Each structure stands twice: as structure tokens, then as C-alpha cells.
Amino acid sequence: MDMGNVIENTASQFVGRNACVYAIAAIGLNVQFGYTGLLNFGQAAFMAAGAYGMGQTVSVMGISMWWGILLGIGYSIFLGLLMGIPTLRLRADYLAIVTIAVAEVIRLIVRSVKFRDTFGGTDGLKDFADSFQQVGADLGINPAETYGFWAFTFSGRDLWVLIVGWSLVAIFGVVVWLLMRSPWGRVLKAIREDEDAVRSLGKNVYSYKMQSLIFGGVIGTFAGMILALGTANVQPDNFSRDLTFFILTALVLGGVARVTGSIIGPMLFWALYAFLDSFLRELVADQPVRIGDTTLINSTQVGPIVFMMMGVLLVVLMAFRPQGLFGNRKEMAFDVR
Amino acid sequence: MSVDGPAVNGMSETARVARAALADVPPEPGASKPDPILTAIGVRRNFGGITAVDVDRVEVQRGSITALIGPNGAGKTTFFNLMTGFDKPDAGDWSFDGTPMDGVPSHRMAARGMVRTFQLTKSLTKLPVIENMKLGATDQRGERMWEGLIPSRWRAQEREIEARADALLKRFRLDHMRDEYAGSLSGGQRKLLEMARALMTNPTLVMLDEPMAGVNPALKQSLNDHVRGLRDEGMTVLFVEHDMDMVHDISDWVVVMAEGRVIAEGTPDDISSNPAVIDAYLGAHQGQSLLEGDE
């Protein structure tokens, strides 16, 4: 068994593309869920908006990839309005139902045969990331070369995606941090607790909830763009429910209503995943784990068992530290009134 | 706490003015006041087949403390909700300060000078007391998203708001709890915080829904003083209350509701001797509609 390999994988995933994409998406989800209390179960749809907006430019519309940024933002504003207009006046649970449904509908539409020409069907979209890589190359990062040391060795392509991605994490992190210290953020946090009280003090609660939903969604859109640029293609099934709930899990792990929580949570989530996965794979690499004649784990079972173990860890976290790793217990612990 | 003590001695100048203005108003339901700040005409609200509120006419005199009393289920809170835009009536008109308020959404009320509190206190328990207070200020620049991003755009205003909030906290004796989470306050302190927070909107009409509910007797006297203080500063107070001591102590005018209608109006002394009110509270005519009860 090679523990060095396990540690390298863990370290690499800690700062890898997945962690980066999840961190951006979690910052957005944190605005909606953590600060405003909006149960958005459709963050995957906002990410798909960004990824497809970017993917469509070159291969479908024949315009420059950079228009994809505007297109993606436009798509996600549309999505936010679509989800928010009918539900934000109602109780919180309705938003949850609608967002999860919209996200599924979006996924089914983009993978459908009917819209194959616009969204590429199940094959998705590709060949759009060249101008993005070109900028990296112009700045002196050779896509074909490898950079870095030890576990942190990346190809030039990946490195450029990571640089842009983590820069976005930093930018959005600072923007959200600033906003949540402002009177605007104060209104959101107050809405999270009691809408009627906020309304009686003269704030247009509906408008604030809409702003929060769309702002968080647009941040999620950028996560989708980085995902698309990182893999250089857009696959409809990347944007399933799992994605939304993994991001939510990563956010809760880090601690809701904390910017640090929304960034470090996804990093730890992927590091933990990589650790368990490579550890178990190393464990069963030569032969299955057995007690007597009973096989405990063989190599095909590693995948599901990793998720089970992560689930157990989360349950333990919720039981002993409901505010997550970085959360503030007083502010965040679930209400026991 | 003697019933007529404060009414005789130690009455403030504004209280005297308010009572003098109401002296000539006939003690009957729907009576016109010399200078009404809030007028409701023909306001009706049905829930299914039940008429929760059916008010022909109510006026609230500016600069007075008006109590709205009535047995449980009389429609007092529903009436509050209708006046503040939290609920929409099936019929009727009402105006505040001479402007029709029909169709004005609840979040516009505060800017016009009308603010309310709630029967079940809505202090935002997971925000510190001072943040609760600062939330109350209207027209904050930093509450617009793009301006919120740039602290220099709202810092100065925030400092003014904070100074005002601190002054109010001091007046309501909550200054020692300034930085605690509102969740750590006692029930009575939460009532005080909610009232103080409402004052941050600089209202002209303060509507208090059961300010005494769940407040311990020791705090009641000081709450009374705070409510009187509002009037003495020129605000109009309309409050719903079950605590008859408080009603008698501080109100200049009393409106009595039962089964959704206004059944009596008058000064506290008129009301305590009004047979219709006694019937409504004590149920002298059991099984008979209060409205048809013979006097």
C-alpha cells in the first residue's frame, strides 16, 4: 500500500478544479441559502446556464467565446426570474420545490433530441475553449507543458483554468464579504429570520429575495463556466441533482453564512473524497478486504462505499457541530425555540 | 397601580391637549374626531363564510393614545393587518394622514410614517440588538446592492443611524445588551426592542399589537411610560391590548370591537361603564349575538 499516493491525491484535490468550481458555486449558494434563507435546490441549473452559454457561442452561434460570459449571465438572470417570480411571495418550501424541478427540466431540455441543434443533445458541446487557452498561452503558460511540484503538478491547460478559477473565488469571496457587512446584507440576514418584521420596517422583501436569488445564481453561473472551460466541453449530465446537493453538502461542511466556510468547505469536501477514495483503492489494490470467508470490500465497491462514509461523517458533523467547521454557533445553530 | 391615578396627577401637557380635543367627541361607535390621522370606512374582511372585520367607520385622533380592545376573536389583529397592508380587505377605504392607503403594499407604510409591532414579538434573534435597531432606519443608501458594495457611500449615514439607535437603546434601557444577540433578551426586553426598532423608522403613527403580552408586572409600568413618551413626542399611538389596567392608565380614547364590529367608543371612563362592553367581555347574553343584545 502506497500512502504517499493517497496523500498526493488528497493534496491535489484540495486545490483542484473540482474544489474550485464547487467553491464558486458554494459562494453563490451561500448568498441565497446561508444569508437569505432561500432554499435553492437548483444551483446546478444556474451552473448549466453558464456552461451552455459559453458552449453555444462558438459551436452553435459562431461568435466569439467571450460573448458566452454575457450570454451565461443573461440565461441565469432569466432562470432566477423564472424561479423567483411565482415563488418568492410564498413560503420558503415552494422555492425549494420549484428550483429542483426547474433544474431537472433544464437538464432534460438540453439533453433532448429535439433541441440537439441548440444544445448538442447528450453529446453536449465542445470546441469552444480555444480562445480562453490562447490568453493563457499569451501570458506565458504553455498548455502542453507541466508546471508545479509534488502533488501540485498541473498541465499548462489546467493551471490556467485554476488560476482564473481561484481568482474568481477570491473576487466573489471579497464581494460577498463586503456586501454582507453592508446594510444590504443586514436586510438579507433579517429576511432569513422573519420576513414580516422586515416588511413592517419598510423594506421590499420580495425585491431583496429576488436580488439574492439572481446574484447567487450569477455567481453559480461563473462556476459553470469554469467547469466548461476546464473540461473543454459541456455535458448535460454533469448538471444533475447530485451536483446541487454535493455543493450544498460542501457548504454545510464549511459552515453556512460564512465566506470562509463556503470556500474551505468545498476544498475539504474534495480532499476528503479523494482521501477516502484513494485510501480504499490502495487497500483493495492487491486483494479484497476479507474477514474469514466474507468479503468486506472489493475494488468495484469502493465508489459507493466512499459516499457512504462521507454521509456518515456528515451526520456526525451535524450532530456535534451543526454550524459547520467555520460557522458561528450562536448565529447558525438550528433553532430550538 | 391605581386606576385613575395618572389621569388626575402628573398628566403631561400633550395628554391634556389630546383629552381636551376628544372631550367634545360623542362616545358612540364611528364618532368623527376633530383631527383624524387614520380613517377607516366600510372596511370588511371575510375568511370563508366568517366576517372577521366589518368596520363601518373608525377614526384615530392625531396625537392621542387610542386603545383597541375587545374579546378574543373580535378582529383586532385582523384590523391591524388590514390597516398596515399585511392583509387586503374585501371592501372598504382607509386613509392615513389624508392619503388613501388602498393598495399600498406593506413595505411602503414605514416610509409614510406608519409602523407596527406584532403580537408575537418579532425580534430578529440571530442578529445583535444594535443590528436589529439599525435595520429599522428607512432610506438607507447602503441597502441598495451596488452602494452596499462601496462602504464609503454609506459609512457616514451608518454612523448617524448608529448614534440614533444608541440613543433609543439608552432610552429603553437596553444599552447594556447592545452587542448581544437579540435571542438572549427576555420576553419583556424583546417587546422593548421591537418598540425601539419601530421608532427607528421615525413614525407618526405607531401601532402596537398587544405590547403587554408576556411582559412581567415589574416591566409593565415602564412600558406604560414608554408608550406615553411616544405621544409626548408628538406621535399617535394605536394599540391592541387585553390588559385593562394599561388601557385605563394610558389611553385617551378607547375603541371596542366585538365580532368584527366596533360596538363602542369613548374615553376610558365612558367605556368601563358601557353595558355593551360589559356584555361583550362577560357574556351576559350567552348564545345571543352581541350586536343584537338589548342595552
Image (cartoon, coloured by chain):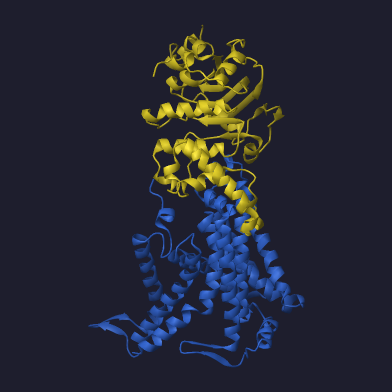
Chain colours: A blue, B yellow
Residue lying farthest bottom?
A145
Residue A199: x and y in percent read: 58, 42
Pick whichever, A68 or A296, lies toward us: A68
A109 with respect to B130 (left or right): right
Q: Is residue B195 above or below residue B256?
A: below
Q: Is residue A111 above or below residue B234?
A: below
Pick whichever, A68 or B120, lies toward us: B120
Q: Residue at x 39, y 68 (%)?
A: A311
Residue A56: x and y in percent read: 71, 74
Quadrant of the image occupied by residue B33: top right
Quadrant of the image occupied by residue A327: bottom left
Q: Is residue A63 above or below residue B96?
A: below
For the N terminus of chain B, give its image quadrant: top left
Q: Residue at x 58, y 52 (%)?
A: A183
Q: Residue at x 58, y 49 (%)?
A: B159
Q: Residue at x 55, y 44 (%)?
A: B163
> Is residue A42 something one can see in this rendering?
no
Residue lying farthest right?
A62
Residue A50: x and y in percent read: 64, 70
